[in-house]
Image: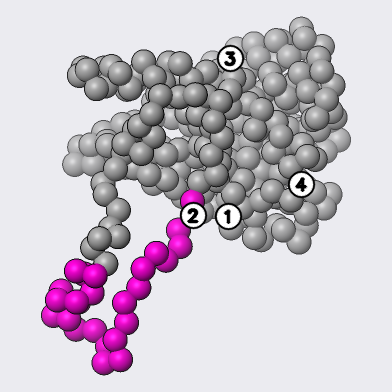
Amino acid sequence: MKSGIAKDKVVLVTGAGGGIGREFALALGREGAKVVVNDLGASLDGVGTDNERAQSVVDEIKAAGGEAIANGESVADWDAAARMVQLAVDTYGRIDCVINNAGILRDRFFFNMSKEDWHQVIDVHLHGAFYVSRAAATHFKAQQSGSYVHMVSTSGLIGNLAQANYSAAKLGIAALSKSIAMDMAKFNVRSNCISPFAWSRMISSIPTETPEQQARVERLQKMESSKIAPLAVYLASDAGVGVSGQVFAVRANEIFLMSQSRPIRSMHTEQGWTPESIANRAMPALKPSFYKLDRSQDVFDWDPV
């Protein structure tokens, strides 16, 4: 154990039984944090439970000389979210950081997406991030300190096919994080997002039917989950004080600061607009600045560094 930058910080990591969340928990443990490892143990599409998944990560942290405790409840349940935060406080006396990482996928093209597909993904990602964050807010406010780290995705920030539910949830989390950062700033609480590029269970369902898809998966497989962890540990630590309201992306050895919505071009007229003048003047002037229907891989089209 390094006993370094996150020493004695109490951190709740949701969805930490595997993939990126597991790497967060292990890295935090190595850096001296006390970790609450949450994982329901469900399948990729949110079915079933397996409490052993969280406990196995706890065992790894303890074997390396760290401190950790397991929680096997669902972030999509308001009361369960409160209990996992309270577990941190009851066990370690406080809570310093929440990393909202839990998630599922139910990918469908929009015209095939069911009500259940929509609600299941929104419940885990967006509602879960709110429930856990809200449960921690009372403690953060009382402590006059705290950090939130929310996992988002370029599927929401940029766009992707067949992920309307996931994209909406992830972009919603980015907006939630910004609101938290603004509302909690006076209590010295910060909130940031990480959009990860890494091979994990969450993206292992990507189809590989075409040469383009196969090439994309080969690139993703080169991007290890462990590469995301240092930024999460930094944001959880006191070294991250002063960093709030930002959206970062990590792609192998690259860290990006992502843009946030701002006006890029405007038109005005003293007479006000009519549908005809919009068609004849406004849209032709604005059209050169339109965004294309790019997918994430269209924007990040170079090999990872």
Q: Is residue 280 magenta?
A: yes
Q: Residue at x 27, y 36 (%)?
A: 162
Quarter residue 209 falls in: top left
Q: Is residue 189 visible?
A: yes
Residue identifier under label 1 = 178
Q: Check disc 2 and give the amino acid type.
A: Gln
- The answer to whether residue 268 is above or below residue 84 is below
Q: Residue at x 25, y 60 (%)?
A: 288
153 relative position to 281: left or right: right
Label 3, label 4: how many angstroms apart (C-alpha)?
A: 32 Å
Residue identifier under label 4 = 241
Which quadrant, please, contains the N terminus?
top right
Q: Earlier in the sequence, mark 1 or mark 3?
A: 3
Q: Earlier in the sequence, mark 2 or mark 3?
A: 3
Q: Is residue 190 magenta?
A: no
What is the crowding at mark 1: few (fewer than 14 residues within 10 Å), some, or many (at least 20)? many
Given residues 303 and 152, the one toward you in this image is 303
Q: Residue at x 59, y 37 (%)?
A: 100
Quarter residue 180 falls in: bottom right
Label 2, label 4: how many angstroms apart (C-alpha)?
A: 21 Å
- Give coordinates of residue 7: x percent, y percent: 84, 28
Asked if marks 2 and 4 touch (Cβ < 8 Å), the reply is no
- Give coordinates of residue 13: x percent, y percent: 65, 30
- Tell me the magenta residue range: 259-285
Asked if marks 2 and 1 touch (Cβ < 8 Å), the reply is yes
Q: Between tags 2 and 3, which lies in front? A: 2
Label 1, label 3: how many angstroms apart (C-alpha)?
A: 31 Å
Residue identifier under label 3 = 53
